[in-house]
């Protein structure tokens, strides 16, 4: 599975590219999702998905790649922002074993981790059921991804 970056831009008012994610958006804080906004979606976009994963996390299970913190999908094409702490749209399953956002909380003494927030533009509104894992979501949407980009934030346990 491979995707190429597009000119679509993903931004957050909480942190910039490569900057620290504020404590309130982490497992040590209020654990609420940051606000996001995006622009320059590809022509023909019918829906969006947003995922967050930490590739620096120790593997949690066989055939895993880091730790999944958020799987959000069925976001209509008319949407170009998500407010802080959003409960809108459809949540998938995280590696915390729950649906919904779970903020950064790397192991103590593990150093700085990088959190990749990926926005994917889709050419169809697939109306997928709640609770999909990251891999189930990607299996469903891969043929429909027409654009993507990411915002990377960092966090280190205090």
Image: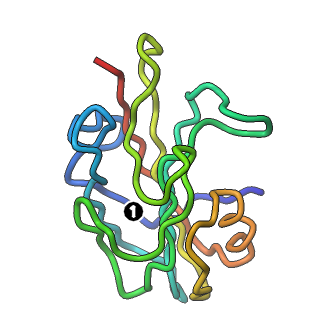
The reply, left or right, for residue 130 in relation to residue 28 is right
Identify residue for label 1: 9
Residue 55 relative to residue 2: left or right = left
Q: Nearer the viewer, residue 71 or 36?
A: 71
- Looking at the image, which residue is at 54% across and 89% down? 44
> What is the x, y in percent for residue 50?
48, 63
149 on left or right of 105: right
Front-most of residues 36 and 2: 36
In which quadrant is the N terminus drawn? bottom right
**The quarter of the displayed image where residue 138 is located:** bottom right
Where's residue 28, x and y in %?
28, 31
Identify whether 11 is placed above or below 28. below
Quadrant of the rendering where the C terminus is positioned: top left
Q: What is the basis of the colouring in this image?
A: rainbow
Q: Residue at x 62, y 86 (%)?
A: 126
Q: Can residue 118 be spotted in the picture?
A: no
Residue placed at 57% from the left, 45% from the top?
95
Q: Note whether 106 is above or below 83 in the view shown.
A: above
Q: Position of residue 148 (x, y in %)?
A: 54, 64
Looking at this view, name the residue that lies furthest to the top: 109
Q: Secondary structure at mark 1?
A: strand
Counting from the top left corner in percent of width and height, residue 132 is at 63, 66
Q: How many marks?
A: 1
- Where 60 sits versus 6, above or below? above
Q: Nearer the viewer, residue 18 or 113?
A: 113
């Amino acid at each position: 599975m491979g995707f190429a970056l597009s000119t679509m831009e993903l931004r957050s008012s909480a942190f910039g590219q490569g900057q620290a994610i504020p404590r309130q958006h982490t497992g040590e804080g209020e654990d609420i999702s940051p606000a996001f906004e995006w622009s320059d979606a590809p022509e023909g976009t019918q829906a969006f998905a947003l995922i967050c994963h930490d590739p620096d996390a120790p593997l949690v299970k066989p055939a895993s790649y880091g730790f999944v913190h958020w799987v959000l999908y069925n976001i209509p094409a008319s949407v170009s922002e998500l407010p802080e702490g959003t409960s809108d749209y459809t949540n998938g399953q995280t590696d915390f074993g729950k649906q919904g956002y779970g903020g950064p909380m790397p192991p103590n003494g593990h150093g700085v981790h990088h959190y990749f927030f990926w926005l994917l533009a889709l050419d169809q509104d697939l109306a997928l059921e709640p609770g999909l894992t990251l891999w189930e979501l990607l299996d469903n949407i891969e043929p429909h991804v027409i654009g993507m980009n990411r915002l990377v934030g960092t966090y280190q346990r205090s």
